[in-house]
Image (cartoon, grey):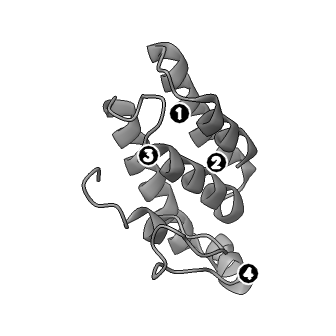
Amino acid sequence: MENTHDFIQWLFPLTEPSSAVPESPVLTEDEATAICDSVMAQCTLAAATDRIAAFYRNNDHWLKAADHNHLRITRIIRALRRLRGDEEAEAFRAAILAKVTTTGAPVGLRSRGYWMTA
């Protein structure tokens, strides 16, 4: 997951274009609503969230002042909030912030600020 940089836009799509991967999917509001209403899509998003959470839980290389994973985390939180709801977004963010806190990582205030407003 660390060496491929365009997968996150596909696993966690948003309703606005990605500046990092312009050819990635952009959801319409109708598509986002359909994902919210689809049991299969919800199961797929839950599995993707579990996998990416395990990746961040089991790796420390992203725990630095600035890292491209910080942008990924912001996207994940935003996508979860829109596609799975506040509870799922908050749970993912809490897990990320807990790792930052328990490791004493120097993750910058800017990144944490984005996570808090995502």
| Residue 88 to residue 38: above or below | above
Residue topped by disc 3 = 69
Residue topped by disc 1 = 96
Residue drawn at x 37%, y 67% as measured from the top left: 6
Residue 89 coordinates in the image, percent (x, y): 65, 48
Label 4, secondary structure: give it.
helix
Residue drawn at x 56%, y 65% as measured from the top left: 42
Residue topped by disc 2 = 88
The three-letter amino acid code for the residue at tag 3 is Asn
Tell me if label 4 and label 2 are in contact, CB under 8 Å.
Answer: no
Badge 4, how many Cα within 10 Å: few under 14, some, many 20+?
few
The three-letter amino acid code for the residue at tag 1 is Ile
Separation of residues labelled 3 and 4 (CA atoms)? 26 Å
Which dot marks residue 29?
Answer: 4
Label 3, secondary structure: give it.
helix
Instruction: For marks 2 and 1, give the one nearer the viewer.
Output: 1
Label 1, secondary structure: give it.
helix
Separation of residues labelled 1 and 3 (CA atoms)? 11 Å
Residue 59 coordinates in the image, percent (x, y): 31, 33
Separation of residues labelled 2 and 1 (CA atoms)? 13 Å
Badge 1, how many Cα within 10 Å: few under 14, some, many 20+?
some
Label 2, secondary structure: give it.
helix
Say which label, 1 or 4, has the lower sequence index: 4
Say which label, 1 or 3, has the lower sequence index: 3
Say which label, 3 or 4, has the lower sequence index: 4
Tell me if label 3 and label 4 are in contact, CB under 8 Å.
Answer: no
The three-letter amino acid code for the residue at tag 4 is Glu
Residue drawn at x 65%, y 41% as measured from the top left: 115
Tell me if label 2 and label 3 are in contact, CB under 8 Å.
Answer: no
Say which label, 4 or 2, has the lower sequence index: 4
